[in-house]
Image: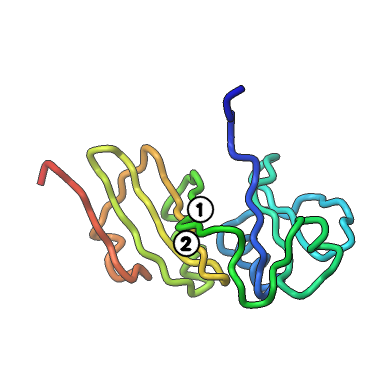
Amino acid sequence: MPITELNHYLLVAKDLEKTREFYQKVLGLELAERPDFGFPGYWLKTGEDICVHLASQAPNKIRDQFLLKKHAKGTRGSGSVDHIAFLAREAEEMRKRIQKHKVEMHYRSFPDAKLFQIFLKDPDDVTIELNFLGEVIDEDSWKGKGAASSVSLDRTA
């Protein structure tokens, strides 16, 4: 049976509230109902789809048993993740949201493919990639507007 979609990912956060706030306020995810597992955490959703689970890095025996492992403070999880990518819409509105919260971002534009991307880091230093499919931006209007760097791959230029 093939895999059909990504269900969610779990971040074990250094500061649970700061990380929740980032995903809600900067990325616009909404809180979802989460069962009481006996340890602090959140589920976040986009629309009806729960896609991000958050748990605290603070020592917790119930969490450690639930996750079948221990996440000691300051250690990394079970592997290395380079980035997490989301599909998004309305790049200009997202830029304003990111700037409002003073989060550094980088962007890439692929006009030939009609793809625009924004990259930023969450409070736990996880790179978040936002993909705006079918959106082409006016790069001149984005210069100096909160982007730390930009790359454009236009093969017609």
Marks 2/1 in contact by CB < 8 Å: the verdict is yes
How many angstroms separate mark 2 from mark 1 (CA)?
6 Å
Query: Element type at marker 2?
Result: strand
Q: Percent position (x, y) of residue 70?
A: 73, 66
Q: Amino acid at mark 2?
A: Thr
Q: In this rendered view, identify the residue nearer to me: 6 or 2.
A: 2
Instruction: Please say if 146 is above or below 139.
Output: below
Residue at x 23% of width, y 60% of height: 140
Q: In this rendered view, identify the residue nearer to me: 68 or 138.
A: 68
Residue 19 falls in which quadrant of the image?
A: bottom right
Residue 132 falls in which quadrant of the image?
A: top left
Q: Percent position (x, y) of residue 85?
A: 48, 49
> In the shown orientation, is residue 76 left or right of residue 15?
left
Residue at x 50% of width, y 57% of height: 81
Q: Percent position (x, y) of residue 28?
A: 60, 56
Residue at x 70% of width, y 54% of height: 53
Q: Give the numbered dot on residue 108.
A: none
> In the shown orientation, is residue 133 left or right of residue 137?
right
Q: Give the numbered dot on residue 84.
A: 1
Q: Quadrant of the N terminus?
A: top right
> In the shown orientation, is residue 15 left or right of residue 84?
right
Q: Amino acid at mark 1?
A: Ile
Q: Which residue is mark 2?
A: 127
Q: In this rendered view, identify the residue nearer to me: 40 or 136.
A: 40
Q: Reading the chain from its start, which is encountered first: label 2 or label 1? A: 1
Query: Element type at marker 1?
Result: strand
